[in-house]
Amino acid sequence: MTDLFSKFDPLIQQREDLLATGVKDPFSLVMEEVKSPTVAVCNGKETILLGTYNYMGMTFDPDVIAAGKDALDRFGAGTTGSRVLNGTYQGHRDCEEALKEFYGMDHAMVFSTGYQANLGIISTIAGKDDYVILDIDSHASIYDGCALGNAQIVAFRHNDVEALEKRLKRLPSEAGKLVVLEGVYSMLGDIAPLKEMIRVSKEAGAMVLVDEAHSMGFMGPNGRGVAEDQGVLDDVDFVIGTFSKSVGTVGGFCVSNHPKFEILRLVCRPYVFTASLPPSVVATAATSIRKLMHGGDKRAHLWENSKRLHKGLKDLGFTLGTETPQSAIIAVIMPDLEKGAAMWEALLSEGLYVNLARPPATPANMTLLRCSLCAEHSAAQVEQILGMFAAAGRAVGCIS
Ligand code: PMP
């Protein structure tokens, strides 16, 4: 018998080597208690959360929690079915109405996760003779959507408008084309030049999908994302998003003005062949989305936090993923995995949780300590976080 697991041996070895240096496993942290959007108990210690993507702090919003409890009481724990069978409850419809209102678009489709939204939409709308043109640093769910479908895949250099234009010009003019972009790229926290990219895409006759997972709720005057911020939302054919970040629960969606959009409910396999979200989840999502429409003050505070942390870390001597703060994600570039893991552990023992990110999730083989800020972080917490980075960075030898 050939052991099908032998292909994982190099990774198993790398993990064992890392643990042999004495660091804790950074990928098996347990949150023993979660006290608020910004504080949890980890390893018995009160810890500031700086790696949750809980940008708008909606997980503990009292209206959101009340809506979830009420739906649990009135509709039960789960739907036990697909959206096209017994799995569409009033709450799913309400949630889709909230999304249509939030984006000012004609159609909204809720999926069980954002991962499935990308998987479903990309694999379904780009068929055999079509092309998907995507940024090389796209999220795994975008790549997996391509792998599930039958279209030809063409990648272009990260955020490079000229490279996108060149690739588009080489494709047959009559072929169906879907350009897939993200508003904020989650590894380095950089934003896409959507305005220019959408212009060259439209000139080439392509449809455009923008994944706004890390920008919904925060970027743009109404929190609709980077496309809104850059004034080009009307030119986007499909917006993909998630409930697992600013919305504060779990789920995914696609919104669109395409007149034939509703047919997707019958042909999109990751929508049809899986159970729908529980009633409590869609109730929390709908309530949260409606509140996010009026989240201007929170958005402003989140920007202040992001700018302060970026400047503070830069002043301490850390190398960051972006020269200037572009989003609520601030990535600290580590020299290698060993130093990154040691720094991650030193921060945790200071009482700070961040994300350790490593290849293949990261671009250019980088090891990153990714920080994502929350609108509920107080100014005092941000100063405390900077103090923890200073202490851990000096202890590990990342800064002098
Ligand atoms: N798209 C992007 C850009 C993401 O970062 C993520 C999650 N990290 C997803 C999609 C998937 O979202 P979900 O967690 O809802 O599956």
Image (cartoon, helix red, strand yellow):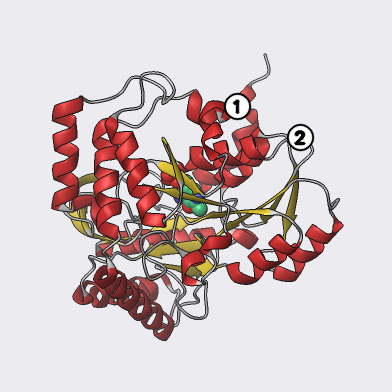
Residue lying furthest front: 259
The residue at 44%/58% (across/down) is 214
Specify the label residue 5 is tagged with: 1
Is residue 372 in view from this perspective?
A: yes
249 to 295, vertically: above or below? above
**Closer-to-camera residue (233/248):** 233
Q: Which quadrant does the C terminus fall into?
A: bottom left
95 to 223, vertically: above or below? above
Percent coordinates x, y for residue 199 in the rendering:
67, 67
**Closer-to-camera residue (239/250):** 239
Left or right: 163, with 274 as reference point: right
Say which element carries label 1.
helix
Left or right: 309, with 117 as reference point: left
Left or right: 188, with 64 as reference point: right
Going from N to C along the chain, the mark reached first, 1 or 2, is 1
Percent coordinates x, y for residue 332 in the rendering:
46, 69
Percent coordinates x, y for residue 240 in the rendering:
50, 49
Specify the label residue 86 is tagged with: none
Label 2 crowd (10 A; few <14 / some 14-19 / many >=20)? few
Residue lying furthest bottom: 315
Q: Tag 2: residue type?
A: Lys
Cβ(mark 1) to ligand 1 < 8 Å? Answer: no
Say which element carries label 2.
loop
The residue at 34%/32% (across/down) is 277
The residue at 50%/40% (across/down) is 117
Q: Tag 1: residue type?
A: Phe
Mark 2 — residue? Answer: 128
Left or right: 94, with 378 as reference point: right
Is residue 19 in view from this perspective?
A: no
Cβ(mark 2) to ligand 1 < 8 Å? Answer: no
Measure the C-alpha gap from mark 1 to mark 2.
33 Å
Percent coordinates x, y for residue 191 in the rendering:
53, 68
